[in-house]
Image (tube, grey):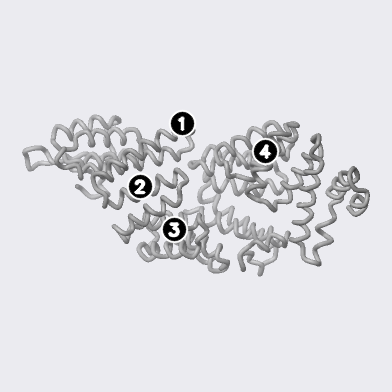
Amino acid sequence: MASLEARVIEVPIDNSNDVLEIDCSQLPSHAAEICDILENEGSALRFYQLFALEYYKQGHIEEAVVALKRGMANAKANDQTAKVPLLNLLASIYVQKAKSTSVVGGDRDIMLKMATALLTEAERIDRTEPNTHLIAGMLDLAKRQPDAALRHFDAALRAAPRSVAALLGRARVLFSKHRYQHALEAYQQVLVLRPSGSSRPDPRIGIGLCLHKLGHADDARRALLRAAEVDPAAAAPHILLATMDLNAVKRLLDPRIDAAAPPGAGLMSAGAGELLRRAMGQLQAAYERQPASAATLIRLADRLFFQSKYDAARGLAERALAAADTMAIQAEAHYQAARAHHAARRFDLAYDAYQRCVAINDRHHLARYGLGQMQLHRTDMSSAEATFQRVLDAHPRCVEVLRALGYLHARLPNTKAKALEYYEREMHVLAEDASASEAALCFTDANLFLEAGLLYEASSARRARTA
């Protein structure tokens, strides 16, 4: 095979010492033409894989699938091992297609089932192939089965201890399971293996996120700044640095948030104004590097929302939606658009956008809370109760949800006692979360106590006067 720079693949001609040079920059639009050549020359299966990869890199996914299927059809019965790389690559393509924002519902399930069948066949042929375990781990992640994914990544690492992809997969799962120290160690192993910054994603970003979760804010910041230095075109480090600073601003403005934060996570050495200026500088840097980045657009939409620039925030969210390449980003773009519509009192549009967000990501609790508010606005009380209850199940101390449920039950027949229960839970949470010096500030909401007092009035005059 010729050098990668030349992008030429040399195909041996059957019964000859000559080769056929095929320029990959001028591949036929249909992979079947290349496959015909390979079949005529009796080429090894690895050539089908090479051309499939070239089609894939050029964005011709369906032609890559054609090349792989033709190659598998030409596998010799006495050499099934050569078929395994093709099975794995095709499974990987199906996993990526299943994660695409253009594939939803039943089509996604079909893609995942086809990937599962291919990996089952690959494992039947060779149970020790590390790439089979690696792609099985990717499949498990797409199925939201992190424990199974971790087992497959560990199996891949037992067979290939220096597999960067398996280490990155392992680190991702450990991070999602809040095992930040172990995730940090995995990212650090990747950095040792690929110190030049050639690994994608850059392990320094993962290191920074783990350090931040572990409460080492300054070290986290240094890791992300180094990632930005190594890859000047990358937007992700700047987005994360901005997010850290914006979260720190929120902690300064509401000290109760800090009680749940890891030690040192707030970057409290800087004032709110300086943190905000620094965050906006990082967002500008991210936008300059990747103006079409959905993640950058979403973070900018978030800032504009808090500046009450709702139409501008919605516009950026819609641009992010068009650029989104993952379901998670697509869901967040819908959420940003939904709350901009909500704040601008375009309630029907907000309702639709909240619905789309939770349809994609059913664990997006902020969107579900917004959906519940829209259901209340529509006086769809039964749906609103079910929606708020799902959020409360995930966040049992969320005062906003407790208040919404109290409000809802206060307006339903024969559920006044339940309304009181939710209001009392809210007051209990507020009292527990407030320090002695903050207690008075937490209990300045007259509406809460007016609602509770009116409900107590029907059952207990003494408790009504207390409320």
Q: Which residue is mark 2?
A: 135
Amino acid on which disc 4 is placed: Ala
Residue 36 as seen in the image, left or right of residue 54: left
Q: Which residue is mark 1?
A: 106
Whether tag 2 and tag 1 are in contact, CB under 8 A, the answer is: no
Cα distance in 3D space between marks 1 and 4: 26 Å
Q: Which residue is mark 3?
A: 171
Closer-to-camera residue (459/284): 459
Q: Which residue is mark 4?
A: 386
SS state under label 4: helix
Residue 255 as seen in the image, left or right of residue 329: right
The tag earlier along the polypeptide, 4 or 2, is 2
Cα distance in 3D space between marks 3 and 4: 35 Å
Q: Which of the two marks, 4 or 2, is nearer to us in this view?
A: 4
Query: Label 4 neighbourhood size at 10 Å, few (<14), some (14-19), many (20+)?
Result: few
Residue at x-position 41% and y-position 54%? 150
x then y, percent, for residue 317: 60, 41
Q: Quadrant of the rendered structure where residue 409 is?
A: top right
Q: Which of the two marks, 1 or 3, is nearer to us in this view?
A: 1
Whether tag 1 and tag 4 are in contact, CB under 8 A, the answer is: no
Closer-to-camera residue (384/220): 384
> Relative to 297, is 349 above or below?
above
The tag earlier along the polypeptide, 1 or 3, is 1
x then y, percent, for residue 38: 18, 35
Amino acid on which disc 3 is placed: Ala
